[in-house]
Image (spheres, grey):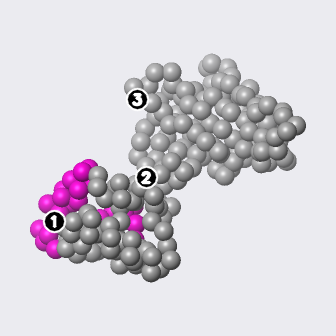
Amino acid sequence: MFTGKTMLDSSKEMLKRTENQAEKLGKKLPKDTEQVYNDPTTHKRFEELFKQRKDPKKIEIDSELIGKVGNSIFVEPKRNNRAVLSFPKRYGIAEWMVALFTRPTVPINDNELTVVLNELSLNPSITKTVIDIFQIYEPEEITGFKLKMKILGPTGTVIEKFILKDCKITKIEWSPIDYSDDSISQITLTISYNEFKIK
């Protein structure tokens, strides 16, 4: 809970106060903090929240929409690096192996998404694992597996969840072997799905 007065201050004053507080604490604000403060959409959201309360001096805002530095409040947007993709546990593909993934599209056109895995598991081999999954679900009549995508807030709380059904690996690509490159080897999967829902 915090007072309406804090949120009703001008964006410029509020931003300056937050920067000063962060400096005292030896912390840095996100690079796009100023941009978010000046975003009309942010202002509109705050106005809507105040209207929902009988007492405009007090308001409770979802902690995932904001961040806090000292006693000052700043808006925290969603960020592309705060998300996890979960395969069924029986496959042994841990969430931390996933380097990149795309989300489904609306309307559903090609029904495919891309998942990039870091080859961090040597025993058992992640290569063998994905080939086994591909072969198990290759027959058309077999129903595929479920994938769960969790979008996280600044504190690690799940703020959105995509659940994809009837998923099947349709293509597997490995990063090239290059003797001048010592970066982590990766596997790129193309995965089809029949439907998805958001919670």
* Residues at marks 1 and 3 touching, judged by CB atoms closer than 8 Å: no
Give yes or no for residue 65 being in the magenta stretch: yes
Q: Quadrant of residue 159?
A: bottom left
Which residue is nearer to you in this view: 113 or 90? 113
Distance CA(mark 2)–CA(mark 3): 19 Å
Distance CA(mark 1)–CA(mark 3): 34 Å
Q: Residue furthest top?
A: 140
* Kind of residue at disc 2: Lys
Sequence-first disc among 1 and 2? 1
What residue is at 85 percent from the left and 47 percent from the top? 123
Please tell me the numbered disc located at residue 78: 2
* Kind of residue at disc 3: Val
Residue linked to disc 3: 106
Q: Is residue 78 left or right of residue 128?
A: left
Q: Could you tell me which secondary element the residue under label 1 belongs to?
A: loop
Q: Which marked residue is nearer to the observer: mark 2 or mark 3? A: 2
> Residue 28's spot in the image, x, y percent?
48, 68
Which residue is nearer to you in this view: 185 or 1? 185
